[in-house]
Amino acid sequence: MISRPTQEQLHAIQEAFGQRLRAERLRHHVGQKVLAGGLRVSRTTVSNLERGVQRPYLDQVYTAAQILGIPVTDLLPADADLSASPVITAAEPLSATQRTALERTVANVRAELSITPTGTQRRRSSNGG
């Protein structure tokens, strides 16, 4: 049976994500204000995400990866200390079922955010469609 991560594990994931986000942002020479604009959040929110103070939403993780031009998996922690729970084992490759589920989730987020596979965002019409 797979259990939910503990609060400590979630915090470790948050911190690891933040460290990776900051490292990738700096590596790609993207400022916090630019990233914040793309995510439609404040610069303070980006700072909080990078410091592990704020938990990112799934769409923020995906959109940040798109802005930085990297795979989403590059922002996810590989070595967060999750030994007490088998929820995340990033050291192991995804199974075909897990990969399919992840791809379906990414497709759903793209559709929800109206993001094309190239990473550009389509404008939604004023009638909500």
Image (cartoon, rainbow, N blue to C red):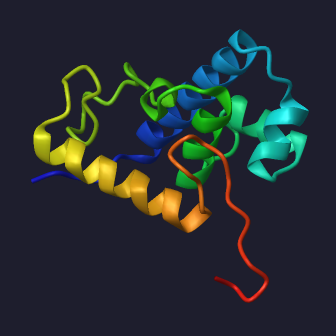
Residue 79, given in percent of the width and then of the height, sits at 37, 19
Q: Nearer the viewer, residue 67 or 36?
A: 67
Q: Is residue 21 visible?
A: yes
In the figure, 115 relative to 34: above or below? below
Q: Nearer the viewer, residue 49 or 5?
A: 49
Q: Residue at x 88, y 48 (%)?
A: 42
Left or right: residue 72 compared with residue 113? left
Residue 30, given in percent of the width and then of the height, sits at 80, 22
Q: Residue at x 68, y 60 (%)?
A: 122
Q: Residue at x 24, y 39 (%)?
A: 85
Q: Nearer the viewer, residue 49 or 11?
A: 49
Indicate the quadrant where residue 123 lies: bottom right
Left or right: residue 6 compared with residue 70? left
Indicate the quadrant where residue 66 lies: top right
* Count of marks, rendered view: 0
Residue 111, given in percent of the width and then of the height, sits at 50, 64
Q: Nearer the viewer, residue 67 or 7?
A: 67
Which residue lies most toward the top here?
27
Left or right: residue 86 compared with residue 63? left
Residue 83, given in percent of the width and then of the height, sits at 25, 27
Q: Is residue 57 visible?
A: no
Q: Residue at x 23, y 42 (%)?
A: 99
